Amino acid sequence: MDSMMAFSELTELTRNDKYVQYELFFGPNFPGMHGNFGYILDVAGSTITKVRPNPGLLHRGFEKLMEQKLWLQNLSLIPRICVPDPDPNEVAYCSAVEKIMGIDIPERAKFIRTITLELSRITSLLMGMGALGAMMGHYTVMYRMMQDRDRVLDMFEWLTGARVYHIYNTIGGVSRDLPEGWIEKTEAVLDELEGNIPEWDKLLFDNPVIHTRLTGIGPLTEEEAVQYGIVGPSLRASGSTADVRKDDPYAAYPYLDFEIPRTGGGDALNRAIQVRLEFAESIKLVKKALHMIPEGDFKIKLGNSLKLIVPKGDAYARVESSKGEYGYYIVSNGGVKPYRVSVRGPSLPGGLALCHKHLPGMLIDDVAIWMASFAVCPPDFDR
């Protein structure tokens, strides 16, 4: 209550004295900004009094570009919508097209898709946890976690030929089978990552400075999270159990037994701990999938993919990305290209809507921490 009264007095002071308040451009070149995006902040002293989101700096028109490209060609475009976690774009897009076509991919392909999704999730969670540490000046955490992320990217490079934009999942399955020795090496990398978790706990999650900085930042109840459209780890950190992998199973998730961690509490500290728990669960999930993967085909033969014609219809397919529900709504008019594509990214509710609730009254120092705790990814805005 005291902080609310202080903020009210500060707001009144800015109304009466135009020299008290100034304008601060937080991004796109501000070192704490998470990508090509910005907030225009009205600030009095170090306290934010008003916020105006400033998106559009990264606009690439992906949704409109997809209408001009063949069904297969779009697979080289869509991973760029979310660079840290590209594979959900591939799987959601392919799944929507497969729904319209009325096809079911082979069992082996379902497991391979699940493995690539979870590995992509792991790389994104590592980047997110590292970025959160860096936003508080704890660069050791970021450097070490990026080092572990590179080990997973090595496996993607072996599997797909690319480290970031994999372009591996395709309509009807995956583009190629797992290379010999890949499963064993991936298991060894996962064992190493799992063995490093106590180090992360010591550096970040058990650090009293981190607890002091994160406690009470951006609190959100489950009801508020649902109202604003918050999804993924941020929603589960507020007490919800919602997860697309359980609520609307796809790929090989129906065959896998795994837990959905839930912290509750709803502030930045709980969101950080939620990500830590989900990181550990994803490692276990990939290990199970690697052990259970069946033999068989990895793709349905659909003929010349560059001449693929998708029948008239529409479909929405969603997956659980590292940031929450990621969906593609696709409309086909029966041609060789999509008629319309719309992407549902998970960052928009927090980055563009929730900021108006949380940032006023917050210190400049905490804006980057707040964004990192919600895993705000600006490309989600500029599709």
Image: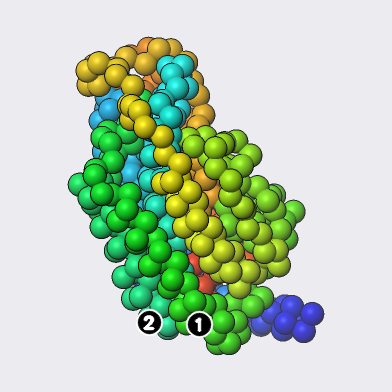
Tag 2: residue type?
Thr
Q: Is residue 127 left or right of residue 41?
A: left
Up/down of 160 relative to 331, above or below: below
Give the secondary structure at mark 2. helix
For the view shown, which residue lies furthest in the right direction?
1
Percent x, y for residue 272?
56, 69
The quadrant holding residue 335 is top left
The answer to whether residue 96 is seen in the rendering is: yes
The answer to whether residue 333 is seen in the rendering is: no
Q: Is residue 30 left or right of residue 68?
A: right
Give the quarter of the figure containing the C terminus: top left
Up/down of 45 relative to 191, above or below: below
Residue found at x 43% / y 58%: 122
Q: Circle 1 sits on which residue? A: 202
Q: Circle 2 sits on which residue? A: 140
Q: Is residue 250 left or right of residue 141?
A: right
Residue found at x 62% / y 53%: 260
Give the quarter of the figure containing the N terminus: bottom right
Tag 1: residue type?
Lys
Percent x, y for residue 380?
44, 49
Percent x, y for residue 207?
54, 85
Residue found at x 30% / y 63%: 151
Categorize mark 1 by other alpha carbons within 10 Å: few (<14), some (14-19), many (20+).
Answer: few
Q: CA distance from mark 2 to mark 1?
A: 12 Å
Categorize mark 2 by other alpha carbons within 10 Å: few (<14), some (14-19), many (20+).
Answer: some
Total numbered badges shown on the rendered structure: 2
Residue found at x 35% / y 75%: 144
